[in-house]
Image: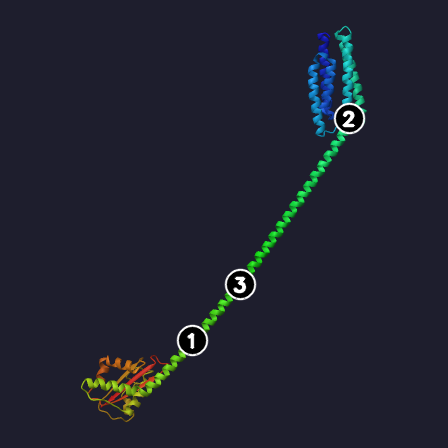
């Protein structure tokens, strides 16, 4: 084969390869399958490049196997296109051989190229009229993919159902926990209310008991006071005169006589000083008018009053510690005395004492 013939051969094959690649792109055929047929045609057309072509063919065959395993589905047009491409390659090979058998002129090579193009056109027509059959490998791959998709959908549905069940259980657990906490809070509230109610009742009972004790204490004090008042009213005069005469004796004075009339008048004055604690009577007159109103004759008279002292000793000591009252008690001109006492809880001081002196 002359250099010129080989050059034209390669040019035609380059154009043919471009046409095949374009057809593959447009028809969606498997590129590796078409590449395999194309390289086989090149190997047949150019024997001296067989070693390189065989390596490329092996690589193309490997890529084609991988494409089939990945499930690339080829339409009937792809299969027809591959057959057309194969026949076109064979036609091209025949044209190349015819051209090389002649004198190897440029004109013969051109004719062979024209014949190859015509045969290529025939191949395309054959491809267009191909059947719509699917290979068993493609059908198996389609079934495998459908099964995988079905399994994937089932897995998704299962995961979705499991997730829904998990969420439902979490919601139920959450609601149950909330209900338990609510119930517990209500029980705690009820316990607190009962404890508060019990505490209030205990405080009420304690307050009632305390008030009862206060009332009992008041009654006891009142009874004691009444007893004391009765005792004072009955015995205050006798005890008071005894203490007075003892002090007069210590001062070298004669004893005073406890006069019943003066005691009655002293009692009148004791009742009067409850309202007006003064030596002036409530009607504004002098305290000594109590004597004249009763027809008691006297040359010299005196009066001591005291309030707020609950005992004979307290009243007597208060008088003895007062200069004016002490002077009446130790007056050598007095010979008779009347002692009066009254108790009035409504008064300012409660206990009221009086002493009336005459010569």
Residue occupying the far top of the picture:
103
Q: Position of residue 257 (x, y in %)?
A: 24, 90
Residue bearing mark 2: 77
Lower sequence index among marks 2 and 3:
2
The quarter of the picture where the C terminus appears is bottom left
What is the crowding at mark 3: few (fewer than 14 residues within 10 Å), some, or many (at least 20)?
A: few
Residue 282 visible in this rendered orientation of the protein: no
Residue 300 falls in which quadrant of the image?
A: bottom left
Q: Position of residue 108 (x, y in %)?
A: 77, 9
Residue bearing mark 1: 213
From the viewer's perspective, tell me whether residue 42 is left or right of residue 355. Answer: right
Residue bearing mark 3: 191
Give the vertical position of 204 relative to 259 (above or below): above
Q: At 67% from the left edge and 45% from the top edge, which residue is drawn?
A: 161
The secondary element bearing badge 1 is classed as helix
Q: Do the residues labelled 1 and 3 touch (CB within 8 Å)?
A: no
């Amino acid at each position: 084969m002359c250099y010129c013939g080989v050059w034209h051969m390669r040019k035609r094959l380059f154009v043919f390869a471009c046409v095949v690649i374009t057809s593959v792109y447009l028809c969606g055929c498997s590129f590796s399958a078409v590449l395999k047929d194309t390289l086989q045609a090149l190997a047949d057309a150019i024997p001296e490049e067989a070693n390189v072509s065989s390596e490329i063919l092996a690589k193309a065959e490997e890529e084609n196997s991988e494409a089939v395993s990945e499930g690339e589905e080829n339409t009937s047009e792809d299969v027809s296109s591959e057959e057309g491409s194969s026949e076109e390659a064979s036609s091209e090979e025949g044209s190349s051989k015819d051209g090389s058998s002649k004198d190897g002129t440029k004109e013969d090579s051109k004719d062979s190229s024209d014949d190859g193009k015509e045969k290529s056109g025939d191949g395309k027509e054959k491809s267009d009229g191909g059947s719509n059959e699917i290979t068993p490998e493609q059908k198996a791959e389609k079934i495998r993919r459908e099964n995988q998709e079905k399994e994937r959908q089932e897995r998704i549905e299962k995961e979705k159902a499991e997730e829904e069940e998990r969420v439902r259980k979490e919601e139920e657990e959450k609601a149950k926990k909330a209900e338990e906490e609510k119930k517990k809070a209500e029980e705690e509230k009820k316990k607190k209310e009962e404890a508060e109610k019990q505490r209030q009742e205990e405080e009420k009972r304690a307050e009632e008991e305390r008030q009862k004790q206060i009332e009992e204490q008041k009654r006891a004090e009142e009874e004691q006071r009444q007893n004391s008042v009765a005792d004072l009213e009955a015995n205050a005069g006798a005890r008071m005169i005894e203490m007075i005469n003892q002090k007069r004796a210590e001062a070298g004075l004669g004893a005073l006589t406890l006069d019943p009339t003066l005691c009655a008048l002293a009692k009148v004055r004791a009742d009067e000083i409850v309202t007006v604690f003064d030596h002036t009577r409530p009607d504004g007159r002098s305290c000594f008018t109590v004597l004249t109103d009763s027809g008691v004759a006297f040359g010299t008279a005196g009066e001591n009053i005291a309030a707020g002292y609950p005992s004979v000793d307290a009243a007597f000591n208060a008088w003895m510690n007062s200069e004016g009252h002490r002077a009446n008690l130790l007056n050598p001109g007095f010979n008779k005395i009347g002692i009066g006492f009254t108790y009035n809880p409504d008064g300012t001081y409660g206990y009221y004492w009086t002493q009336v002196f005459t010569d």
